[in-house]
């Protein structure tokens, strides 16, 4: 597509640089040549083990989480026709957090990593179904926004209640707090298998919707007059956004601002055309999460990923609020 090659190449290079940095930097420092040698099976034993068994799964999980959250942010901004919308508006993130926290509190997470992942995904979909029920099965922006606000408050209260109940069980409460702060530590190939294929399929399913999303920006009546089934399109947006956010939350925990900041910056830089914005946001989101994950390794105590994204995204959000309309 015209106008896509340059920004896509730029973001792809940025993603490649952050990916190499993610594989090279940590307690054991590796050079780019050592990383490439490890990936091709020609490096030393220690370098191959560090890259292939520890850092590559973490990097691929972060790549999928970032791409999924950014794509979900584009969907929500298109749905509400508001560039300040984010994936958390419908309560999906808080629902996923409640599911994961419940699994940790009940001890299910200690039996299998899939228990935590599946509980988080189930909580995210429960939030979506609850929002749809509260909205009286009408996928209008106003109904869903009000229902999402209510569900966010309810699920947030549920998470705080469980954390309160486990306050005396320091190991469990510590696990809950760490998960709620978001992070990619100790991610394995099993986590990659849970998040990467589903995220890739959902992202591919978005491209045929790009033109209809462009028309939706004209308003519901304008889009309908041009042949768009607005109700069906809104349902597709909600379902795909839920899946993407659920997978990202299940693997990475609660990571804020990615779905808000990345699409908004790229919209300002390269325009609102979703045929460009969707692929650019996926690349930008993946690079942003990997960059933040690399930053955590240089901070005292390896600060949590969700904290770093908030520290970078919060000031940007405040700057956007101060900009003239």
Image (tube, grey):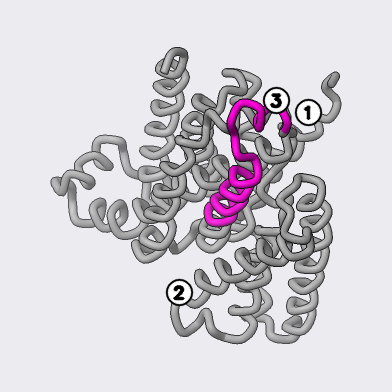
Is residue 230 within the magenta segment?
A: yes
Q: Which residue is mark 2?
A: 113
Q: Which residue is mark 3?
A: 218
Which residue lies at the image location 30% right of the left edge and 51% below the top edge?
51
Which residue lies at the image location 37% right of the left edge and 33% below the top edge?
16
Is residue 292 within the magenta segment?
A: no
Q: Nearer the viewer, residue 100 or 144?
A: 144
Location of the C terminus by quadrant is top right
Q: Which residue is mark 1?
A: 320
86 left or right of 74 in image: right
* Boundaries of the magenta span: 221-245
Which residue lies at the image location 54% right of the left edge and 84% below the top edge?
108
Q: How far separated are the C-alphas under marks 3 and 1?
A: 23 Å
Q: Residues within 10 Å of mark 2 (few under 14, many from 20)?
A: some
Q: Say if 154 sits above or below 325 in the image.
A: below
Q: Say if 324 sits above or below 141 in the image.
A: above
Q: Nearer the viewer, residue 107 or 97?
A: 97
Q: Report the residue that reaches farthest toward the left.
A: 42
């Amino acid at each position: 597509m015209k106008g896509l090659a340059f920004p896509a190449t730029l973001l792809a290079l940025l993603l490649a640089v952050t990916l190499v940095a993610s594989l090279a930097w940590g307690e054991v420092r590796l050079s780019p040549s050592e990383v490439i040698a490890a990936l091709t099976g020609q490096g030393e034993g220690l370098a191959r083990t560090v890259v292939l068994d520890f850092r590559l799964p973490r990097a691929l999980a972060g790549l999928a989480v970032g791409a999924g959250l950014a794509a979900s942010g584009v969907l929500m901004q298109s749905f509400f026709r508001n560039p300040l919308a984010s994936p958390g508006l419908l309560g999906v993130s808080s629902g996923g957090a409640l599911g994961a926290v419940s699994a940790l509190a009940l001890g299910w997470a200690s039996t299998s990593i899939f228990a935590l992942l599946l509980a988080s995904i189930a909580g995210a979909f429960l939030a979506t179904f609850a929002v749809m029920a509260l909205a009286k099965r009408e996928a209008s922006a106003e109904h869903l926004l009000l229902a999402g606000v209510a569900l966010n408050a309810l699920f947030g209260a549920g998470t705080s209640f469980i954390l309160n109940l486990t306050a005396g069980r320091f190991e469990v409460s510590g696990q809950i707090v760490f998960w709620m702060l978001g992070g990619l530590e100790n991610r394995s190939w099993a986590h990659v298998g849970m998040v990467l294929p589903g995220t890739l399929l959902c992202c591919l399913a978005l491209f045929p919707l790009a033109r209809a999303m462009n028309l939706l920006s004209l308003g519901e009546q304008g889009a309908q007059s041009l042949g768009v089934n607005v109700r069906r399109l809104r349902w597709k947006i909600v379902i795909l956004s839920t899946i993407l956010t659920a997978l990202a939350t299940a693997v990475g925990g609660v990571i804020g601002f990615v779905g808000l900041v990345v699409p908004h910056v790229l919209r300002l830089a390269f325009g609102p055309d979703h045929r460009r914005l969707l692929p650019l946001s996926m690349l930008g989101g993946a690079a942003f999460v990997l960059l933040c994950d690399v930053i955590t390794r240089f901070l005292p105590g390896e600060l949590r990923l969700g904290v770093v994204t908030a520290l970078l995204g919060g000031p940007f959000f405040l700057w956007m609020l101060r900009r003239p309309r």
